[in-house]
Image (cartoon, rainbow, N blue to C red):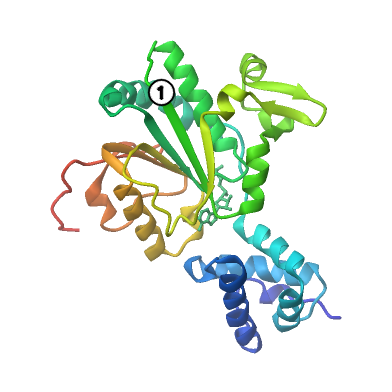
Amino acid sequence: MVAVRASEIGHLPEKDAWAFEALKELFVREKGFDLEAYKERCILRRIYLKVRSRGYNNLGVYYRALSRDPEELEQLFQYLTINVTEFFRNPSAFQYLEKMIFPRVMAEHSLHGTFEVWSAGCSSGEEPYSLAISLLRAKRRHRIRIPFHVLATDVDRAILARAKTGIYSRESLKNLEEEDIKEFFREEEKGYRISSEVRECVTFRTGDVLKYNPGPMHSLIVCRNLLIYFERENQEKIISGFSRNLFDGGYLMLGKAETLIGKNRLYFQSVSPTERIYRLREAPLADNL
Ligand SMILES: C[S@@+](CC[C@H](N)C(=O)[O-])C[C@H]1O[C@@H](n2cnc3c(N)ncnc32)[C@H](O)[C@@H]1O
């Protein structure tokens, strides 16, 4: 078989249009996953890399193989969801949360009971566990007694199963101090297991960020390196959804390459432009954007 040409990667050749439509329908039917919501170039680029790596010469042939092979479909799903992550990714963002935001929120929210955090698009768990470790350290440093809880959601069930196991390689702990590794992990034959103290702070749930609404009880929503994959209108829709799941005055943290879109700039004010941290206004600004 002749492999797909490099020039076909990232755009849709006329002859493959039907197969792309059929593939999108297959994903909705089998995985409940809507590829339409994502940036088309990005999705096509990855699909064609897969087509090429499998040695097929067009998307139609690959689609037929996919529709008969649930294992291959799962592998493509995993490839498209892009699970890259690490503990304390962009460490300065976590330092900012730990020093500037957590003490303030814990003091302000003493009336609300539990301090609820939502990590949306949590991948294999490094982000929610990093948040829990930061929160435990902040509580200790500031002698605060407020309980907290981290809800961690992702659309990819397989990656959530890994997150729940909580076992990581030594390499993935590179952003942690030795004393934190000793305190928050236990070395085992298979790697480093997250401690039960941290594990018990985090609940994992399957959820599509476009539809999932856990409720307006959150003081902080962290959604990093996920919005960039969505079309602009869906980025706006997702951020609006976050505003409905935060307390007034709650915080939103995005990834380094992400920012507020459209009308959402009326609802949030910037707290740290460099760390992409925003705060939900109690009253939105007048709409003159
Ligand atoms: C690049 S990872 C980012 C992980 C982590 N937030 C970080 O910044 O290190 C993106 C994650 O978003 C998840 N994801 C993709 N589409 C999603 C959706 N519609 N709803 C929820 N999670 C989604 C992927 O499965 C993946 O685990």
Quadrant of residue 127 in the image?
top right
Quadrant placement of the C terminus: bottom left
Placement of 97 over or under 10, stated as above or below: above
Q: What residue sits 18% from the left and 48% below the top?
A: 284
Q: Is residue 39 left or right of residue 102?
A: right
Q: What residue sits 66% from the left and 45% below the top?
A: 161
Q: Is residue 165 left or right of residue 129?
A: right
Placement of 244 over or under 70, stated as above or below: above
| Viewer-side residue, 254 vs 154 | 154
Percent position (x, y) of residue 101?
36, 27
Q: Is residue 1 left or right of residue 259?
A: right
- Residue position for label 1: 147
Quadrant of residue 162 in the image?
top right
Placement of 131 over or under 216, stated as above or below: above
Percent position (x, y) of residue 145?
38, 15
Whether label 1 lies within 8 Å of ligand 1 gets the answer no
The answer to whether residue 91 of the structure is visible from this angle is no
Q: What residue sits 39% from the left and 12% below the top?
A: 142
Quadrant of residue 118 in the image?
top left
Q: Is residue 217 left or right of residue 194?
A: left
Direction right: furthest residue: 1
* Residue type, mark 1 in image: Pro
